[in-house]
């Protein structure tokens, strides 16, 4: 029986710490801009609105039942694919350069963020419905599973968002590999798909430039990487002090989104940066532990998928910030300024807490 008041307190505390940290550092990142704007409080008001919307998304995630996701899992996936196609078609029809966002006037929505959640729900729904149909050599069903993930990843790839496409496919691989399927069903399709990403990078001047930046820190387009590394170096062990960082003085672009981890490293130093790493590591441990202890396979997959989604995105963001991954647009979950990314992450966090209150495994209950 599900308790109406239970949720994992440690996970909730970790999410709360990250959201509070995000509020502090987003304000620190945009504090310089505030003094130069005609409406200095516009950014703060917008951030508070996003925070309020995120809390609503968190609550909606917590009250979302597993039965609802089981019933509408395929519909959610189809809707995500529709949004990805729609954003491409609209820009093409208007003769504009293809972008990653749908401009809703008051809000810019990024369909690829919703696609991350959709992939998790699709895998959970597919494995739930097909589990008893799988046989030892049933490659057809495995290829059908990977085909949908490949379609979603491809649509993101041509936005163009190469890093996002790689993230989606890696997320799908991790979720599938944590399921009951034999390892050969999960590993081989992933390996065979890697040349496609290699070809996409080779054919894209922009992506090649990002790879060159990663390989050669002194490449012409490596300024932001060097500035990010400089932020960590300047921060030292204890940091320059909260609000005292200088990279936000337009030295490091998009510091409130793509490079906020570097700002944390500059202002709170090695101690602050490591603390963030520890928090996400605890989320990974706690999320996996909770998910795998649930009674229902579908709930397990949802929980594991959300845990991987949050921590993998954090890993990608941190790797970009320390120069260990080519520069690309990854926000730091709960911390970076962002609309659709923050809302989806908050919804998933609430859903993970929902997973924590689902029935646990029992030796007397057949899975």
Image (cartoon, grey):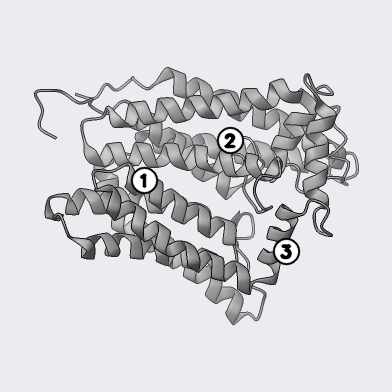
For the point 47% across and 43% down, which residue is it? 309
Q: Which mark is residue 175?
A: 1
Proximity of marks 2 and 1: CB atoms separated by less than 8 Å: no
For the point 54% across and 29% down, which residue is it? 280
Question: Reading the chain from its start, which is encountered first: label 2 or label 1?
Answer: 1
On the question of residue 173 being in view, the answer is: yes
Q: Residue furthest right?
A: 36
Q: Marks 3/2: CA distance? A: 29 Å
Q: Nearer the viewer, mark 3 or mark 2?
A: 3
Task: Give neighbour class at mark 3: few <14, some 14-19, many 20+ (Cα, 10 Å).
Answer: some
Q: Is residue 197 left or right of residue 297?
A: right
Seen from the viewer's position, the closer of residues 20 and 163 is 163
Proximity of marks 3 and 2: CB atoms separated by less than 8 Å: no
**Residue bearing the label numbered 3:** 209
**Residue bearing the label numbered 2:** 334
Q: Position of residue 297 (x, y in %)?
A: 23, 39
């Amino acid at each position: 029986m599900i308790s109406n008041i239970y949720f994992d307190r440690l996970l909730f505390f970790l999410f709360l710490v990250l959201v509070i940290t995000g509020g502090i550092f987003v304000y620190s990142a945009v504090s310089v801009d505030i003094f130069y704007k005609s409406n200095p409080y516009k950014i703060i008001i917008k951030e508070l609105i996003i925070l309020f919307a995120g809390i609503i998304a968190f609550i909606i995630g917590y009250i979302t039942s597993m039965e609802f996701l089981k019933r509408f899992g395929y519909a959610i996936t189809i809707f995500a694919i529709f949004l990805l196609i729609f954003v491409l078609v609209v820009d093409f029809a208007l003769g504009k350069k293809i972008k990653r966002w749908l401009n809703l006037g008051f809000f810019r929505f990024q369909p690829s963020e919703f696609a991350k959640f959709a992939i998790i729900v699709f895998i959970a729904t597919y494995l739930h419905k097909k589990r008893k149909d799988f046989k030892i050599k049933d490659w057809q069903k495995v290829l059908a599973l990977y085909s949908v993930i490949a379609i979603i990843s491809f649509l993101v790839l041509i936005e163009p968002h190469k890093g996002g496409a790689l993230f989606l496919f890696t997320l799908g691989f991790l979720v599938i590999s944590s399921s009951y399927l034999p390892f050969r069903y999960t590993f081989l399709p992933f390996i065979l798909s890697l040349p496609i990403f290699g070809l996409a990078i080779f054919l894209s001047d922009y992506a090649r430039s990002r790879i060159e930046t990663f390989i050669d820190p002194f490449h012409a387009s490596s300024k932001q990487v060097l500035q990010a590394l400089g932020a960590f170096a300047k921060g030292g062990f204890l940091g320059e002090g909260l609000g005292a960082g200088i990279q936000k003085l337009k030295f490091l672009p998009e510091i409130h989104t793509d490079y906020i981890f570097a700002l944390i490293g500059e202002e709170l130093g090695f101690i602050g940066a490591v603390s963030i790493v520890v928090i996400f590591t605890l989320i990974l441990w706690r999320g996996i532990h909770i998910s795998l202890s649930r009674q229902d396979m579908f709930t397990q997959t949802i929980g594991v998928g959300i845990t991987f989604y949050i921590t993998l995105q954090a890993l990608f963001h941190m790797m970009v910030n320390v120069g260990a991954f080519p520069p690309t647009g990854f926000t730091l979950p709960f911390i970076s300024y962002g609309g659709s990314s923050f809302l989806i992450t908050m919804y998933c966090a609430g859903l993970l807490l929902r997973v924590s209150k689902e029935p646990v495994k029992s030796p007397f209950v057949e899975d």
